[in-house]
Structures are given as C-alpha cells and as structure tokens.
C-alpha cells in the first residue's frame, strides 16, 4: 500500500504510477451476488455447465460492471491518504473492458495518477486504474475514475 501524507505529495505524483495492489480472486459466489444485486442473470456469468459447453471462454466470466465495481476496493487497498471531511465519486472519464475476466481469475490494480486540480473547498483527482488478471495478456478493465476530496 502506498501512503500519501499530503496534497502536496499527491500533486508531486501526477504523471506517475503510484502503486500496484496485491492479487485477489474473483469467485463465482461474488459473481452470483452481483447478479442478484443488479438483476443481470445472463448465462455467461452464472451457468457453469452451459459455459463449459457453449461459451468461447470455457467457463463463466465476471460481469464487466462487477469488474468496474472493484475500483473502490482496489483504491482503498492500494492508497492511504489522510482523512478528509468528505470524499465523493465524481464520475468516470473513460471505461473499457479489453478482455473478459474468467471466474476464479485473480486480479490486481495498477494505479496511475493523471491529474490533481484545486476546486472550491478541496481537490479533484483523476486516476487511471488498470485492472490486470494474473493469466491474461490484456487488462480486464481500464478506467479513469474522478474523485473529489473536501477538507
């Protein structure tokens, strides 16, 4: 985990890879829970036997939006910053899913700091997070989350 102690230190990291998180497994149970939470019950995510027979992936794959939803956990596991009065998800500039994430695959986040901008009462931070899988040559997600921190 990368500890960032101040806004000044954060600003000095613009244009750099800040950290790479540890690997963690995306289980079928997590995929099933995501399907229940979102109502997305497409067979390529849930039907293990059908996927073995019919899917080009040879097994179930995680939802793209499940992969994207891992961003808060990846950011929390990868970076520690001083507490703020309020931190909010301001949105995303760009999201891509270049490769599927097979269930049971391990992923990690590669976190790059694109920009830090002063805003009224705080700062706006633009990250680039690449979610890699352990046995893949392409990332499973590349996203540019924007976070606003108010002190």
Image (cartoon, rainbow, N blue to C red):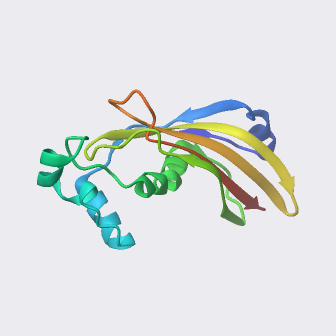
Horizontal relation, residue 147 to residue 134: left or right: right
Q: Percent x, y for residue 118? A: 86, 52
Tell how many labels.
0
Image quarter of residue 28: bottom left
Horizontal relation, residue 117 to residue 140: left or right: right
Q: Percent x, y for residue 22? A: 42, 37
**47 or 75: nearer the eye?**
47
Q: Percent x, y for residue 37? A: 36, 72
Residue name at image x 73 percent, y 31 percent: 15
**Location of residue 16 with respect to 127 vertically, above or below:** above
Is the C terminus in the top left, top right, bottom left or bottom right quadrant?
bottom right
Residue name at image x 88 percent, y 62 percent: 120
**Location of residue 91 with respect to 126 vertically, above or below:** below
Horizontal relation, residue 75 to residue 52: left or right: right
Q: Percent x, y for residue 56? A: 24, 41
**Location of residue 137 with respect to 144 vertically, above or below:** above
Residue name at image x 11 percent, y 53 percent: 49
Residue name at image x 76 percent, y 45 percent: 6
């Amino acid at each position: 985990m990368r500890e960032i102690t101040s806004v000044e230190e954060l600003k000095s990291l613009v244009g750099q890879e800040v950290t790479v998180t540890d690997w963690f497994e995306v289980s079928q149970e997590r995929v099933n829970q995501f399907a229940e939470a979102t109502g997305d019950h497409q067979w390529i995510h849930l039907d293990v036997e059908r996927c073995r027979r019919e899917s080009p992936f040879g097994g179930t794959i995680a939802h793209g939006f499940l992969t994207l939803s891992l961003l808060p956990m990846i950011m929390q596991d990868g970076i520690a910053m001083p507490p703020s009065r309020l931190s909010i998800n301001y949105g995303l500039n760009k999201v891509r899913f270049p490769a599927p994430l097979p269930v049971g695959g391990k992923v990690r986040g590669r976190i790059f700091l694109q920009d830090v901008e002063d805003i009224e009462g705080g700062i706006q931070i633009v990250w680039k997070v690449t979610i890699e899988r352990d046995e893949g040559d392409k990332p499973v997600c590349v996203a540019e989350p924007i976070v606003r921190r108010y002190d």
